[in-house]
Amino acid sequence: MTFRNLVTGGAGFLGSHLIDRLMEAGEEVICVDNYFTGRKDNVRHWIGHPNFELIRHDVTDPLRLEVDRIWHLACPASPVHYQFNPIKTAKTSFLGTYNMLGLARRVGARLLLASTSEVYGDPEVHPQPESYRGCVNTIGIRSCYDEGKRIAETLCFDYQRRHGTEIRVMRIFNTYGPRMLPDDGRVVSNFIVQALQGQPLTLYGEGSQTRSFCYVDDLIAGMMALMNGNHSGPINIGNPGEFTIRQLAELVRDRIDPSLPLTTQPLPQDDPLQRQPVIDLARRELGWEPKVSLAEGLEPTIAYFRERLAQG
Ligand code: NAD
Ligand code: UDP
């Protein structure tokens, strides 16, 4: 059985990988994006395919379409980008999710929300299970994103309770891979681009904070298992392999140019100190777990940036 899929944020990093998987499976895909952080180039290879449509649209405005499934990913994900216009970020999460849930309700579609580990804030419980309610600063510079995603989750569950809308809520932990923007601002792309350009790698703080990095192919497999399964979530999808940011910098540097120095810059406000997903629920309910280690996933990611930078 194939579906008519709407992918919001489909021209972005994760959305474009999801579209590849859906198109390869013979599904119909409508990609909606306002190109804030996405690029037409990420989906260019599908333009002209009879199963594919591309629409420039901002999800803060309502949208009328006939679809079976809505993969709601539209929202800038890098702190640099979501802090560029924080009020717009909050609107995108709230109004965007509200509009997409309204669409899902009207046409009877199932909606998957790309939520985030940021709903746990700077966590006091480590590692983080879905039952942990988080420690989020409501008034800080990350709040537009963190609180935006929290209200987006709330809307999903109220649509489910009130209107019977089928929802799937996925809490995505730091994910990396080809098609991240060179100026994306997130740590993996920053370090790789800096190293390829022969520049020092910039640790924010001492680099002792931790993150757990998931390769994009694993993440998309988890996303598809969640949409196709029977569990509404919220469900953590991420790789439990936890690294300090300094360890990540060393891994990247040693692969590209071991002579490069690491420098320090001030730690941004509210930067979480530690982060690691508990993925027992995903293992049990979806039969999913990540397969690609950080060392393995860095190879194709570095190769991508090498080629991208060579193109200028
Ligand atoms: P991305 O910035 O590459 O993609 C987001 C896409 O949404 C872009 O194409 C952008 O142009 C589009 N967009 C933004 N605002 C929009 C709007 N108002 N209307 C229409 N389109 C809009 O980021 P990504 O890493 O691909 O993240 C995709 C989703 O996954 C986001 O919702 C993000 O919050 C979530 N997520 C990602 C990560 C990660 O590590 N990549 C972690 C947690 C959550
Ligand atoms: N970070 C860093 N150097 C960089 C970019 C980020 O040390 O050039 C740190 C950042 O302070 C954070 C971690 O790396 O502690 C992950 O940052 P990212 O923006 O990738 O994701 P998030 O903080 O949203 O998890």
Image: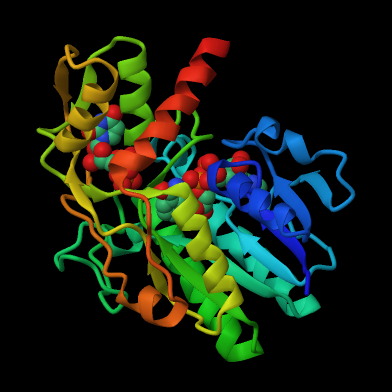
Pick whichever, 147 or 17, lies toward us: 17
Residue 214 screen position, x and y as percent: 37, 51
**Residue lying at 19% horizontally and 65% vertically, measured from the top left:** 127
Report which quarter residue 190 is drawn in: top left
Q: Using residue 309 as the reference point, say whether residue 41 is left or right of it.
A: right
Q: Using residue 243 as the reference point, say whether residue 81 is left or right of it.
A: right
**Residue lying at 30% horizontally and 9% vertically, measured from the top left:** 198
Q: Quadrant of the N terminus?
A: bottom right
Report which quarter residue 119 is drawn in: bottom left
Can residue 268 be seen by looking at this rendering?
no
Pick whichever, 301 or 278, lies toward us: 301
Report which quarter residue 65 is drawn in: bottom right
Question: In this rendering, is residue 152 above or below 189?
Answer: below
Q: Quadrant of the C terminus?
A: top right
Residue 96 screen position, x and y as percent: 62, 58
Residue 43 screen position, x and y as percent: 70, 39
Can residue 121 be seen by looking at this rendering?
yes
Question: In this rendering, is residue 183 above or below 38?
Answer: above
